[in-house]
Image: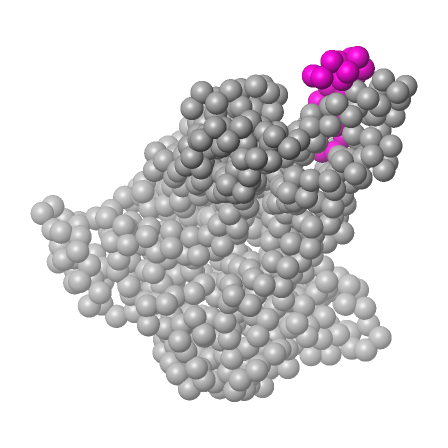
Amino acid sequence: MQLARRNLFQDKTRLALSVGGVALAVMLILLLNGFLTGMNRQITSYLDHSPGSLIVAQKGVSNLLGATSLLPPGAAGKVEAVNGVGKVASILSQFVILDLQGKKQPAYMIGYEPEQGGGPWEIGEGRKPATDSEIVFDGVLARRHNLHIGDTFEIMGQDFTIVGLSDGTASWMTSFFFIRTAAAEKLLRAPGATSFLLVTPAEGIAPEDLRGRLNALSGINALTKREMAANDLKLFAKIFSAPLRLMVAIAFLVGTMIVGLVIYTATVERQREYGVLKAIGAANRILYQVVMTQALVAAVTGALFGVLLAYGAGQWIMSARPQFLIVFDPRNVVWALLAGLGMALAAALFPARVVAGLAPAEVFRK
Amino acid sequence: MIRLAFRNLFQNKIHLVISVGGVALALLLMLSLDAVFAGVERQITAYINNSGADVFVSQSGVRNMHMAASSLPVSTIGAVKDVPGVEDGTPILYLTNMVAAGDERNLAYIIGLPEDAAMGGPWKVTDGRGNLRAGEAVIDRNIAQKSGVAVGDEVEILGGKLKVVGLSEETASLVNSVAFISLSDFVRFRGSPDAISFLLVKVKSGESPESVATRIETQVGNVTAQATADFAAQERRVVKDMSTDVIAIMNLIGFLIGLAVMALTVYTATLARRAEYGVLKALGARNGHLYRAVLAQALFSVAIGLGVGVVFTLLLSAIIPRLGLNLALEINAASLLKVSGASLVIAAVSAVLPIRQIAGLDPATVFRGK
């Protein structure tokens, strides 16, 4: 083991480069996963913070963000009349593309009645919209585009004045903004329209029981908020998982190659020493152990640095680009460390073959 | 010195494979992400580009389709058709919903088409037919395969059951697919008889789509009219503006990884040849010559790495669609230029460490057996 340590630490620059390389690869894997976890949290943020535990959507709609929902006229009244329903808040929602400083920015519009709820859950600055030309805008998006309270901008041909900036409503893909229902109806040219009903069951009523009763109504689909959040997550996972897996696979391969290269060169350079060891009776197993230990030390140190780097880089990215949320799930950290171990195992293969193929007598011929 | 660089590079094949492979993978990381987004840009505009329309008319202020909603009164159809230079107009209804079959649900642009629509229908139907009547649907072939649906089967769209009469191609993207149903079903399921979403316009021969679009906007009022090329460009910008920051971050990481791999390989290669460099120095070779050899070595491996990275990306772009994934990778010139630039910087920076090592090399040490 001492031999392994000596081999590894003899050239400090090489060691630093190899540890750095693995650290970068592990950091990339962690950041990608952290990005996905953060995105998942952002995707369900509205469902996590809006009132009620059940959502009523149009029949055939089971997502909040994926599909446009338009409830049949009078649905709110029918839902309110169902036994076990406590409170109902109706919203009219739709994705829109905003033109902000010449940039296209997708945003999710929520038209709501401030007295019913379903609007912004945390207003950092300003107040709720009081008229049909007022808007509560996402704070992060406003700062990115230099928009302030009192500023006016156009959505689908109509002017709105920012009266409030909300927190916790941003995401890199889409941010939320809130206007009154009547304003949303005008924008979408759909008077009296409702997209979703946020239903709070009466005290003592289980959401699952109430869901069954609500689904007896025609033209609607009632789900628990948890079900709808899971559907939204599944939908976005479908879109992002393929490119993400591709990137993680590349990062893993790069990490493996870096450790492999370092251990390989270190082994080749010490070929004579290994030959001598063999000649004096060292079993292949011991030499494998030496190679393996080197790979393990380089990879694990790199992986640990990678975790630290990922944390630092994550903080930096989030302060420079607040629309990104990077969340490190402890499970992902464990996976990244295991990936480091995997890199070490894969990387030790080549050098081990070099050692195994070495003829003990060779060394004396040179 | 160039020969020396070549020899250093090719003498140890495994070393070469690892260094070139490492750089290739790092560059692949940058290239493939660019290619994924470029692919999405092309996929997302497929409907617009293949609609057959010259001009898209939408609600005032609505400039694209993806993640947008547009609503026009039915009276717009007649008003637009009266505009000089307009040959024909096809109204469509559009929103984003699911194509559901069993437990499989897939996001799709749902397009409501009038019977015998001249524009806006499926453009490549490889199974069944593309002409729709009430109670029928045309869905994407990949989505149909994933859902285990064939022509003649039923799917659920907008909460209603429809019979699949055709399977279309080129209508799926990483994000969603396109499904076509009849305008009457769309109205029945959605209850919006007085509105259309977009009006697809064909201009008379000899008329330019841009000037007809301007004429429509002035004469009809309260609508946005854009030539198809402009409408598609707006759609592409949605993807571009959304992805800029993600691409920038990934590029930086790819660049750093590429740099680490390259620095490591050039460094170890130089280290292994330290004695030779010492001899060369002792024989009177100037430091400048030796630096050039190291730099050339870095440049060669990065150039090969770049080539391999591009080939890998091309291979991926050929293989991925065959796996049934709706992911399309597309390499463009701008991305190649960017990655080539990054490669040059990587080569130059990675040569710095070994150059410093050579500069500090004492020619005499080599004879001391060190």
Residues A95 and A298: in front is: A298
| x and y, in percent, of residue A88 in the image | 25, 51
Q: Is residue B325 visible to us here?
A: yes
Tell me the quarter of the image containing the C terminus of chain A.
top right
User: Is the residue A147 above or below the residue A175 in the image?
Assistant: above
Q: What count of labels does the image hold?
A: 0
User: Is the residue B243 above or below the residue A222 in the image?
Assistant: above
Residues A65 and A146: in front is: A65
The residue positioned 41% from the left and 56% from the top of the image is A235
Residue A134 left/right relative to B148 = right
| Residue A227 belongs to magenta span | no
Picture colour scheme: one colour
Tell me the quarter of the image containing the N terminus of chain A.
top left
Residues B32 and B236: in front is: B32
Question: What predominant SS class does the magenta segment belong to?
Answer: helix
The residue positioned 72% from the left and 70% from the top of the image is B54
Q: Is residue B23 visible to us here?
A: no
User: Is the residue B264 above or below the residue B101 in the image?
Assistant: above
| x and y, in percent, of residue A203 in the image | 11, 46
| x and y, in percent, of residue B311 in the image | 69, 55
Among the 4 quarters of the image, the one containing residue B364: top right
Among the 4 quarters of the image, the one containing residue B145: bottom left
Residue B7 left/right relative to A28 = right
| x and y, in percent, of residue B101 in the image | 37, 73
- Range of magenta residues: B346-370
Q: Residue furthest left?
A: A204
The residue positioned 28% from the left and 54% from the top of the image is A227
Residues B68 and B106: in front is: B106
